[in-house]
């Protein structure tokens, strides 16, 4: 049964839908508030923290996927250069680095203007895209920060991996 089939004809709050998906995948989650949920999703490289929040005013479901990075200060210009190159390759969402918190962040927003409802597949795909992008670029970020690679050289790992799978 498709994820959506269970909700046909139902008007469901977007965070209730996210909670259902987290239960479906057996992810650890915490309903922080009526309009916000946090969860942990295990990846190949690490566990990612995802927070999704519904903004009634913006009619948007916002997602942030974070993981810790503690790069030396002298690596920050190279990180920002690489993030620009990475974001040029991504059509849905973007990366940023929150220096104060030492967090790499992938952000994505699902706009539901005009009273539209999110489908389970849309939300599942947005969570999947966040984790997939974090997984794809995590090795390149590590090579840049700890492997002494240039941004252009490090990002080739992510590009090669994308072309190398069938």
Image (spheres, rainbow, N blue to C red):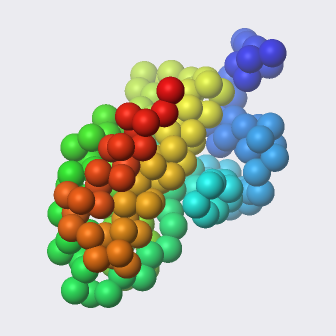
Q: How many marks?
A: 0
Q: State left or right for residue 7 relative to residue 94.
A: right
Looking at the rendering, which quadrant does residue 40 occupy? bottom right
Q: Compare residues 94 and 18 and report the one nearer the observer.
A: 94
Looking at the rendering, which quadrant does residue 17 occupy? top right
Q: Where, quadrant-wise, is the N terminus in this rendering? A: top right
139 is higher (above) or lower (below) than 124:
below
Task: Residue at 74%, 56% (x, y): give it.
Answer: 29
Q: Compare residues 133 and 159 and report the one nearer the observer.
A: 159
Q: Quick one: which residue is furthest to the front in this view? A: 164
Residue 162 visible from this viewpoint:
yes
Task: Residue at 36%, 43% (x, y): give it.
Answer: 160
Task: Residue at 54%, 48% (x, y): give it.
Answer: 131
Looking at the rendering, which quadrant does residue 98 occupy? bottom left
Residue 20, x across and y down, in percent: 76, 38
Residue 109, x across and y down, in percent: 42, 41
């Amino acid at each position: 049964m498709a994820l959506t089939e269970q909700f046909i004809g139902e008007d469901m709050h977007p965070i209730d839908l996210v909670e259902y998906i987290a239960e479906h995948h057996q992810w650890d989650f915490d309903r922080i508030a009526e309009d916000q949920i946090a969860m942990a999703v295990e990846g190949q490289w690490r566990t990612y923290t995802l927070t999704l929040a519904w903004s009634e005013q913006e009619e948007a479901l916002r997602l942030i996927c974070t993981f810790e990075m503690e790069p030396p200060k002298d690596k920050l210009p190279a990180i920002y250069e690489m993030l620009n190159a990475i974001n040029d390759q991504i059509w849905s969402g973007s990366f940023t680095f929150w220096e104060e918190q030492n967090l790499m962040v992938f952000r994505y927003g699902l706009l539901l203007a005009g009273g539209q409802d999110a489908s389970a597949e849309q939300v599942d795909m947005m969570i999947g895209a966040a984790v997939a992008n974090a997984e794809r670029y995590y090795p390149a970020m590590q090579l840049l920060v700890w492997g002494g690679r240039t941004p252009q050289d490090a990002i080739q790992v992510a590009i090669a991996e994308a072309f190398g799978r069938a």
